[in-house]
Amino acid sequence: MTRIAFIGLGNMGSGMCANLCRAGFTVQAFDLVPQAIERAVSDGAHAARSAAEAATGADVVISMLPAGDHVLDLYFGAGRVAEAVAQSVDDAGRPAPLLIDCSTIAVAQAREAFERASAIGLTMLDAPVSGGVAAAGAGSLTFMVGGASDGFQRAQPVFEAMAANVFHAGEAGNGQAAKIANNMLLGVSMIATCEAFHLAEALGLDAQTFFDISSKASGQCWSMTTYCPAPGPVPTAPSNRDYQPGFSVAMMLKDLQLATSAASAHGADVDFGRAAEQAYAALATAGHDQRDFSVPMLALKGEL
Ligand code: NAD
């Protein structure tokens, strides 16, 4: 039976950990917040007193942390997870455990983590997710995975317990590359969708009429049909609950900053991505960082 260490039991990690328990894996859970561990235990996990303790003897280590510095520190710094894993392999002579980081982090940091893990004989995958808190709880996330094919194959049963879709994007860091390129597109398309509804309304169309037409015409996109920023046409969208997230302005800004800095490092022109980053940065600076990322709709209407 595969034994899993799960580290980072926040909004996303708690649901992912619960689904692994439900699928029958033995899970050792750790978070810096004791209440998060208690919740994981009530979902069927075993409590660990530290990340290193959770990782000792594990076949697979999964992390779901806020950002890249946390990830590098967990595995190779104060968290001592890579060291604990390598040590327990030496002691028991078992096959090297798989490290899977599901956090959204910089491509360069994912590649650094992969190199540092490889240097001590460990296989590491970057496996960021799309789908948000609801999909984490429902086990219907999309995983975008970078790293060696054999590691990807070994991880399949673990991904399947948490996922609706799993893609191998290629070498280390490519999962993060897919994630930030996708989310840059999402940020740009959300702002463009807000502007389209704003223009339609200024020209005399109500939101429902414009939605009915554009959702069947060439302007159709996810930001419109699944997450409509104008209240009404899509009842489950955050626009119908005063723009409570959902996916917050702060999270979109984080992903756009990752995208634009990776673009700078690799000489890619992403002018609209940068414009979206500036728009979300302005919203965050104005104190709207915890509202849903469809809130530019309210700003355009002068209601923020
Ligand atoms: P979160 O802040 O709710 O959870 C992060 C958890 O990590 C917290 O419980 C925190 O206590 C814990 N943590 C931090 N450092 C730790 C350490 N050293 N050891 C153990 N635990 C530690 O964040 P989240 O919303 O769950 O997001 C996690 C990651 O997933 C982020 O990288 C985010 O960008 C990404 N993501 C989030 C969403 C979303 O909708 N929330 C969607 C896709 C991707």
Image: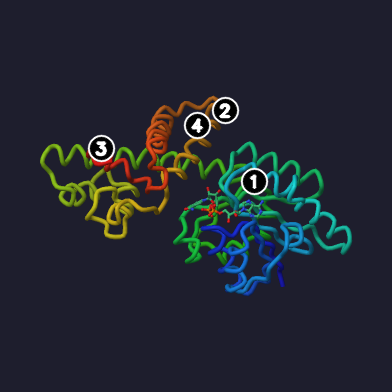
Hey, what amino acid is under mark 2? His
Q: Nearer the viewer, residue 246 or 260?
A: 246
In front: mark 2 or mark 3? Answer: 3
In the rendered image, residue 92, in percent from the top left (x then y), is placed at: 87, 64
Q: Tell me which residue sits at (47%, 58%) in the image.
A: 133
Q: Earlier in the sequence, mark 3 or mark 1?
A: 1
Residue that numbered label 3 is attached to? 300
Asked if disc 2 is less than 8 Å from ligand 1, the answer is no
The residues tagged by marks 3 and 4 sit, at their Cα atoms, a distance apart of 24 Å
Residue that numbered label 2 is attached to? 266
Q: Earlier in the sequence, mark 2 or mark 1?
A: 1
Residue that numbered label 1 is attached to? 70
Secondary structure of the residue carrying numbered label 2: helix
The residues tagged by marks 2 and 1 sit, at their Cα atoms, a distance apart of 24 Å
Q: Earlier in the sequence, mark 2 or mark 3?
A: 2
In the rendered image, residue 91, in percent from the top left (x then y), is placed at: 89, 61
Among the 4 quarters of the image, the one containing residue 272: top left
In the rendered image, residue 47, in percent from the top left (x then y), is placed at: 68, 68
